[in-house]
Amino acid sequence: MSLKRKNEEQQQDQNGVKKVKALKPDDDTTEDDKSKSAKNYENKGKKLPKDTAVTRRERKLSRKMQKPNFELSKETLKLWEKLRIHKTKMPQEEKEKLVEKLLSIIKKQDKKLKSFAYAHDTSRVLQCCLKEGTASQREAIFNDVKEDIVQLSKNQYSKNLVLKILRYGSKSQRDHIIRQFAGVVPKLIRKKASSGVIEYAYNMYANKEQRTFLVHQLYGNSFNIAKSSEKSTLEDVLKEQPQKRPIILKNFKRSLLPLIDKAVISHTLVHRVFNEFFSCCDEEEEIRSEMIELLRESVIHMVHTRDGSHVGMYCLWHGTAKDRKVIIKTMKEFVTKLCQEEYGHLLLLAAFDCVDDTVVVCKALVAPILKALPEIIANKYVRKVLTYLLKPRDKSHFLPETIAFLSKGDNNKHSKKPLEIRHKELSDAATAALILYARENLSTLVRDRSMFTFVEILVKFSETSVLDLMKDLCEMLSMPFQAGKESASGEMHVVEDPAGHLLIKHVISLPLEQDKPHFASLVLECVEASSLCSWSSCNRGSQILLSLLKSPDSSASEAARTLLKKNLKIVKKNRNVKSTQHLLENLEK
């Protein structure tokens, strides 16, 4: 006899603490029972004997045999296995015959195809028939299941059949499937299985009208009653009936609450709905604040799409200090991934714009980016984030649409510190680390076509002294030059490098600033006259010399003209170089 549990007797002592009596073995437990229990414990984890394993297989088989479609599924699975394994080598005609045979076997038994869609194995048979069959065979499968699309979409196995019809079916079949979702999108979008079907149809195959049809179902009953036509947008309805704005938005908010779930919050359809909600909430601050409080911990799961990133930006702009703190806390873990995303990096720009506590922003968002700079600097969106830290909303580096959207958050009521001060504090915190990284990796950055602009941006926008960085550039320029010759490491001289010469030209052409030495004057100080004139032996070098002559620093420009005229013989030796001809023409003026 095995050990038995006695009823737990709870007694309360004087202090009110509950006592539980220790469990004891039954009095009638013999020594043999104890030894058997010990033996069973020792054998735990060991392989079962063969006869036991056989018994288990038999029980499993007997359970399968009790299913109504057992024999039929067994026969179809054999044909499916043949079709699946040999599909690459099998000619198309033979595939079609096998598919026809599979369908005919099912029809002989007077079975509905949909009954095969709910099991993991037979569902795959139907999916394979859709993939490998002809248009008429696909049509036959579709006709058998077309009235049960909604029900099929709810099951973890049968939903794959709907996905395959969307993928391999005709346009009319796809349109039928989307029409079947009328009135049921709010229920289907909440379930993990069916939400995937809605998302796939919305993203891959729905046209503009069909997308609007799916989205409108999530706006709530008040909107659907108030809209004058199927083409009416939320904005149109709110303009036509301003007195109903609070009711429509409250109902809209109520319909969105079930969507704040990790399983469905990542869908683009959900992002669009939330974005349209926030874009219409300017006059209903209370409703918007309530939604932000509920959504703040889920924002991080939405930022991989355009609409989702805009939702995150709305939450940062109009959220309270506590809301912003929660959002930044969720961003901290993923910040290095976030700054590399096309839309995710916009959330960082919004945080730089509106969060008053720049110390928290630097610690949670800026510091991890600077730490991971060697691994992520090659990404163009990372460089956009760094550019924004140095020069926010610069028109030469950011699209007008991006600047216009970012400016929507400027007048929010929760940001007290002036925008310029926030930007300056963040810039000062990041600049020193960025200049240090640029100096340590200057040779690589200068010669990289995608990253040389990063050095230009540092020199152009950095408020911290970049004199050391410019001197390092001049030191690279002062190295002996010979046209077409590579260094021991296989690198071209900066003057002749495709990316390097562009950087030098751009930096020379930067406007002259007070209390900041111009790069053109530093070049003339650091590079010897003979080495400077030797640049005329190649096109790119002559272009740099022309930039020196046209430099915004007039004193450096005159000094360069005087130096080149003194060494005119060296320049004239390279008259056969096209850019050098232009240089000589400029010097003769």
Image (spheres, helix red, strand yellow):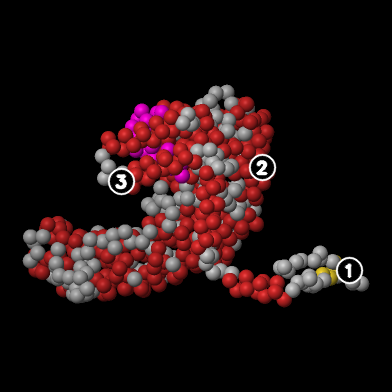
Quadrant of the rendered image containing residue 575? bottom left
**Residue position marked by numbered label 2 in the rendering:** 287
Residue 519 screen position, x and y as percent: 31, 67
Considering the numbered disc 2 on the image, is that residue within a helix, a strand or a loop? helix
**Foreground: 140 or 51?**
51
Q: In this view, does 440 lie to the left or right of 328?
A: left
Residue 201 screen position, x and y as percent: 46, 37
Residues packed near mark 3 inside 10 Å, few (<14), some (14 to 19) or many (20 plus): few
Say which mark, if any, is on residue 86. 3
In whole angstroms, how far apart are the C-alphas of marks 3 and 2?
A: 59 Å
**Residue position marked by numbered label 1 in the rendering:** 12
Picture residue at 65% right of the left edge, 57% below the top: 322
* Image: 59 above or below 28: above
Residues packed near mark 1 inside 10 Å, few (<14), some (14 to 19) or many (20 plus): few
Picture residue at 80% right of the left edge, 66% below the top: 6
Image: magenta residue range: 121-140
Q: Nearer the viewer, mark 2 or mark 1?
A: 1
Q: Which of marks 3 and 1 is in front?
A: 3
Work out whether mark 3 precedes mark 2 in sequence or the reverse, and give the earlier one.
3
Work out whether mark 2 precedes mark 1 in sequence or the reverse, and give the earlier one.
1
Name the residue furthest right: 14
